[in-house]
Amino acid sequence: MLVSHAFIVGMSVVLIIIVIATMKTTINDNRDFVGRNEITQVCSIMKSSFEKMLLEQVYISPTNASGGRITVSLPQRIADMGYRTRLSENDVIIETNGDLLINETCKIGLNSTYSGSTKGGRTLFELIRYSNGTREIKIGNV
């Protein structure tokens, strides 16, 4: 009788461990899926902001000039994790920081120099047109 009770308790503990492990895996898979979808949306917001500022102008100023500013509200968190977005050459790199790491790179494909980073929230996009005809887009938190 004592052996059968010990066996039942042991099997119950094993089943509880299996359920907990399965739930943890399911939760992480869901967070990964949701996080990648939210990163795609952040990339789309950033690309459309860049495109709005980079309308071609025929006139090139003889001095460095501001080409415009846009303030955008990006999500504070992605998949309930903090994140960092940085610009590198012609790419937007988005990295989450938390127990689940999701890193994505979005191609911009617009002819400009990009610099800066943001951690979400209110973000300023600024276009600077240089006298030699080049353009630079800077981003940063407001």
Image: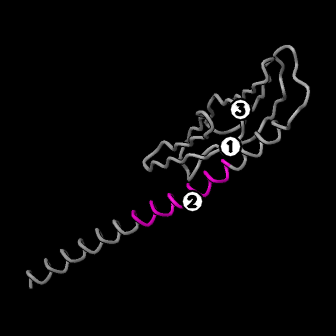
Q: Residue at x 33, y 65 (%)?
A: 21
Label 1 sits on what residue type? Gly
Magenta stretch: residue 45 in it?
A: no
Q: Quadrant location of residue 132?
A: top right
Q: How is the image coloured?
A: one colour
Magenta stretch: residue 35 in it?
A: yes
Q: Are marks 1 and 2 in contact (CB under 8 Å)?
A: no
Label 3 sits on what residue type? Ser
- Answer with left or right where residue 19 lies relative to residue 80: left
Q: Estimate how packed mark 2 is, as few (under 14), some (14 to 19) or many (20 or more) residues with alpha carbons within 10 Å.
A: some
Tell me the quarter of the image containing the C terminus. Answer: top right
> Could you give the CA–CA distance between mark 1 and mark 2, rounded to whole angstroms?
25 Å
Q: Residue at x 56, y 55 (%)?
A: 36
Residue 59 percent location from the top left of the image: 91, 26
Residue 97 percent location from the top left of the image: 48, 42
Q: Residue at x 64, y 39 (%)?
A: 120
> Could you give the CA–CA distance between mark 3 and mark 1, rounded to whole angstroms?
9 Å
21 up-or-down from 121: above or below: below
Residue ID for mark 3 = 112
Residue 27 percent location from the top left of the image: 46, 63
Residue ID for mark 2 = 34
Local secondary structure at mark 1? loop
- Name the foreground residue: 13 vs 117: 117
Residue ID for mark 1 = 109
Tell me the quarter of the image containing the N terminus. Answer: bottom left
* Numbered disc in front, either 1 or 2: 1
- Name the foreground residue: 26 vs 37: 37
* Image: magenta residue range: 24-43
Local secondary structure at mark 2? helix
Dominant secondary-structure state across the stretch colored magenta: helix
Q: Estimate how packed mark 3 is, as few (under 14), some (14 to 19) or many (20 or more) residues with alpha carbons within 10 Å.
A: some
